[in-house]
Structure formats: structure tokens, C-alpha cells
Amino acid sequence: MSASRVTTVVITRDRWPDLTVSLPRHRGPVVLVDNASQDGTPERVRAAFPHVEVVELPENLGAVGRNVGGEAARTPYVAFADDDSWWAPGALERAADYFDRHPRLALLAARILVGEAEELDPICRLMDGPPLPVEDDLPGRSVLGFIACGSVVRREAFLACGGFDEVVEFAGEEERLTLDLAAAGWGLAYVDDVVAHHHPSTARQPGAARLARLTRNEVLTAVMRRSWPDVARTVARSVLAGPHGPRGVVEAVPRVPRALRQRRPVPAAVEETARLLG
């Protein structure tokens, strides 16, 4: 069967050079969500890649742009890609087959190969090992985490759980969605024969700033979904994590009221699994 069961949703902002490399590699329906680029990306994409549906946002929504793409998709499954990533030939057809055969599967985390050397992303190595089991009704080892640009979702489940979160916006945005899917009883699995390629852009945020943003969003996600003792442990661990840790905690403070308005602690079983994973 064709990969037309899957729409690839790409989010981008001011990275036209990266798109010239990645967009030609996408197959099947593609929706590109532009996060208010200033470099003429939407017009350039329409001219160079007329098969790509372009959605222009008036402001930068970060990862929430993927929600817009998911809503625009007209297929049962949605694959995410960044402007510096793409899916291997046949990967999305294989992913769709897994979803068809496993009705509880809401999210498939793929094997991500990084750079020209095609090194396995370290997070994939963690997902492929203990401590979570392989469940009979899932196609691979259960996970409670994933990398957005190497994931495929069941559109219905993704939208029902609210997609990505406007409180965190970007960097580490996967955690809250993971917790909500698990809390709703959906399955998440790492499947290593579905492959994505990621060639990190040279235009990425500097390392220290990104680490602080990740810390900020880990704290905010804990406030939204974890027990108060786990919130306290997250903050304490962050403060001791090096220079970026205290900075991330400070950056989280202005967003805490918004996080509290969306606070909905996960069930005890999901909390126990999250605690097991650290």
C-alpha cells in the first residue's frame, strides 16, 4: 500500500537553505508550517516545491505549529519532520502498516540516524533498551519519550491529547504529549526498522541557551503533569545540573501561572513509569 496514508508535517522558521536539502526527499502529502519566517520561505517553497501545502503563521508558535499541520492533514497518520530532517525511502509505508496492525498504537518512535556518518541518535539507544517491556499489542519496546522529528502519530490520538504544548513552545516539547497519550491508555513504541535522517542545522540555538530552555520546559512539564514531590525533585535536580540549570529554573518562573492553569496530574501508573525513567 502507498505512503499516502501518512502526511509529513514540517515546521520551519528562517531556514530556507535547510529546506532545499530536505524537502526534495519527502514523499507523499507534505504540509509545511512556517513559523513567521522573515527570509521569504513560504514564497520560495511554493515556487520550488508546488506539491507542498504551505501554511503561514502570523507569529512563531514553536512546536505548536505541528498541531496546525496535524489539523490540516487529511490522512489517518502524521509523520513529523524538522527542516533539517527527512524520512528514509519506504519508512512511512512501513510505519502505516504498523499502525494498521496495532490499533492501540498512537505514537511510533523511529530510529534516527544523525549526520553524514549516520550515527544512531543516543536517545534512540536509550529507547531500545530496558527498563520498559515489549507489550504484546505494540510493534516494539514501549517508550515514555520520543524525538519529534523522528516520530509518526495516529492523527486522531494526537489531536485528542492536545498535540504539542503552548506553555513550553519548543525544546523538550515531547514530554507532556507522551504523558498525556500514556494517561489516555494509548501505546507508544520504538520501532527500529522505521528510519529517519537528521542533519542538524548550523543555524541551531547555541548549546547553553538550548540546555537552559530544555531545563525550563522540564520544570514546566512537571508542574503541568507530575506529582508535587516530583516537581520538587525536578527543580532540585535542575538547580544542581550546572550553569544552565539555575538559568532554566529562573526562565520557567514567568510561565508557571500558565502551567498551573493546565495542571492535570497523570495517573499513578504513568507517574510510576515516569519516575522509573528518571
Image (cartoon, rainbow, N blue to C red):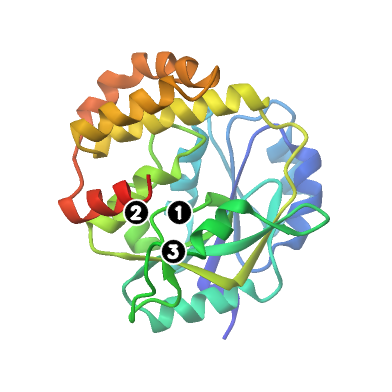
Q: Residue at x 22, y 26 (%)?
A: 260
**How busy is the neighbourhood of tag 3: few (under 14 within 10 Å), some, or many (20 plus)?**
few
Discs 1/3, front: 3
**How busy is the neighbourhood of tag 2: few (under 14 within 10 Å), some, or many (20 plus)?**
some
Amino acid residing under circle 1: Gly
3D distance between C-alphas at marks 2 and 3: 29 Å
As helix, strand or loop, the secondary structure at mark 2 comes to helix
Name the image quarter holding residue 28. Answer: bottom right
What is the x, y in percent for residue 18?
77, 43
Q: Nearer the viewer, residue 210 or 43?
A: 210
Residue, disc 3: 130
Residue 61 in the image: above or below residue 273: above
Amino acid residing under circle 2: Leu
Q: Residue at x 50, y 34 (%)?
A: 170
Asked if the residue under mark 3 is in contact with the one under mark 2, i.e. CB atoms within 8 Å, the reply is no
**Viewport quadrant of the N terminus:** bottom right
Discs 2/3, front: 3
Q: Residue at x 33, y 80 (%)?
A: 137
Asked if the residue under mark 1 is in contact with the one under mark 2, i.e. CB atoms within 8 Å, the reply is yes
Disc number for residue 70? 1
